[in-house]
């Protein structure tokens, strides 16, 4: 519930930046848009959310506000998540390679000691 309110607040603020819109109209547009996204089964609601909000709030719905909304809630987390995934994978591979090198060194010293 908390994340829905944050998304709604973000959408309302972005729509209010372009025109003076009532909060209730933003709530209505957001609920209708999410219902339409669920009904159409389009991945990520691409285009459905924008069309529904533009139809529900025609005076305040700017494509800039809707693109900024998409960037805030989809693009920024994608970039951050990808960066963290790559960083963790590189750290894991570095640690794994260091462990393999240590095993090789102990293997070689054991072989030379037993000979």
Image: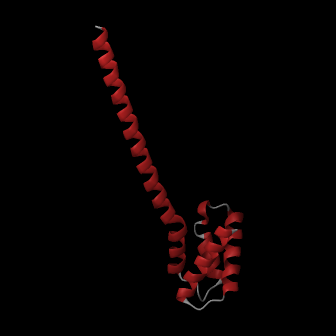
Residue 29 sits in quarter: bottom right
Q: Residue furthest bottom?
A: 20
Say which quarter of the image contains residue 5.
bottom right
In this view of the protein, which residue sits in the foreground, 24 or 6?
6
Q: Say if 98 sits above or below 31 in the image.
A: above
Give the camera-side residue of 12 and 89: 89
What residue lies at 53% left-to-right and 80% top-to-bottom?
A: 65
Q: Position of residue 95 (x, y in %)?
A: 39, 38
Where on the picture, by quarter, is residue 46?
bottom right
Residue at x 27%, y 13% (from the top left corner): 112
Measured as percent of width and height from the top left, residue 41 is found at: 67, 60
Of the pair 85 and 97, the residue shown nearer to us: 97
Q: Residue furthest top?
A: 115
* Residue 93 placement (x, y as % from top left): 40, 39
| Image quadrant containing the C terminus | top left
Task: Please determine whether, in this image, residue 70 is positioned above or below residue 110.
Answer: below
13 vs 101, nearest the viewer: 101
Residue at 70% x, 64% y is: 38
Relative height, residue 92 to residue 70 (above, below) = above
- Counting from the top left corner in percent of width and height, residue 75 is at 49, 65
Q: How many marks?
A: 0
Instruction: Say left or right for 58 vs 94.
Output: right
């Amino acid at each position: 519930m908390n994340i829905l309110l944050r998304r709604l607040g973000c959408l309302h603020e972005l729509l209010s930046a372009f025109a003076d819109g009532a909060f209730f109209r933003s709530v209505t547009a957001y609920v209708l848009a999410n219902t339409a996204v669920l009904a159409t089964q389009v991945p990520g609601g691409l285009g459905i959310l924008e069309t529904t909000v533009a139809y529900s709030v025609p005076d305040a719905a700017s494509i800039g506000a809707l693109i900024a909304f998409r960037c805030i809630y989809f693009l920024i987390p994608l970039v951050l998540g990808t960066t963290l995934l790559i960083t963790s994978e590189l750290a894991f591979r570095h640690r794994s390679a260091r462990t393999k090198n240590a095993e090789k060194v102990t293997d070689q010293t054991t072989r030379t000691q037993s000979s």
